[in-house]
Image: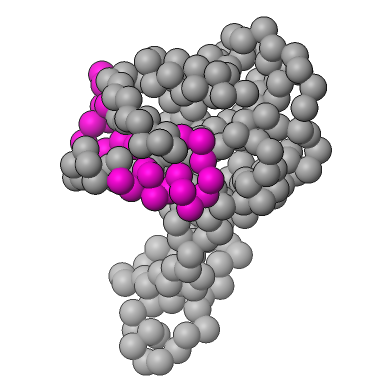
Amino acid sequence: MEEGRRKFLVTAGGTSEKIDAVRRITNSATGTLGSRIAEQLAEDPRTESVFYICGQTAVRPKTPKAEILSVGDVADLEQTVRRVLAAHQIHAVIHSMAVSDYRVKTITTRRLWESGCRSGLQREGKLPSGEEELVLVLEPTVKIISLFKELAPAALLVGFKLLDGASRDELCEAAFRLLEKNRCACVFANDMRDITEEKHRGFLVDGNKNIEEYGDKASIARAIARHVLEKL
């Protein structure tokens, strides 16, 4: 890859899976950390561009080097990732996005489900509001993190792991498993209990099981950008 013309891909925010024409299943990810990482990478003079793939309501980075690519559901995210990686030589991918694990396969009612009917309700328009008990059947979505090394084997990959109620050791072990499975250079692990508007505590784990702890978004963003730039 050409020195002095580095390109990065950062994912941030959350995806949103369609229930009907107006309703969605989504999550609380804001994209704040991802936007700060993008800004840190953009500050390096060797950075040419940062492709910022984000949820529709995610925070955007404040840098002219960022190309904003807004996505909706996981299928949209997958198409956008494939398009960017096919068109550009990406030096590093920072995958901080909260990707939906499931999407809606079928919507029916409890009455129809218990009667054995599995055909589901029509979802093209808005589902009626009068039904008291709707049943949503979910199916797994594509694991986006598993695509990056397949599509861009030379790119350095940073993964993220979020748990709820886990200890430090549990977080770091989960991060290392994710790292090994997806050939990440490092993984940032954090727990829901440690994320508020005032703080964001987590651990950066590398392939040698070195662990660095950080306590706010600014220091996390600087650390991840530093790790990426030093490894390139």
Say whether residue 155 is visible. yes
Q: Note whether 115 is above or below 166 in the view shown.
A: below
Occupied quadrant, residue 52: top right
Q: Is residue 183 magenta?
A: yes
Q: Note whether 201 is above or below 144 in the view shown.
A: above
* Quadrant showing the C terminus: top right
> Most extreme residue toward the front, as rendered?
208
Q: Which residue is rendered at x = 65% and y = 36% of the image?
A: 155
> Most extreme residue toward the bottom, as rendered?
115
Q: Which residues are magenta?
A: 173-201
Occupied quadrant, residue 220: top left
Q: Position of residue 100 (x, y in %)?
A: 46, 52
Q: Nearer the viewer, residue 227 or 98?
A: 227
Q: Nearer the viewer, residue 219 or 52?
A: 219
Q: Which residue is rendered at x = 39% and y = 15% of the image?
A: 218
Q: Which residue is rendered at x = 56% and y = 37% of the image?
A: 157
Q: Position of residue 131 (x, y in %)?
A: 36, 71
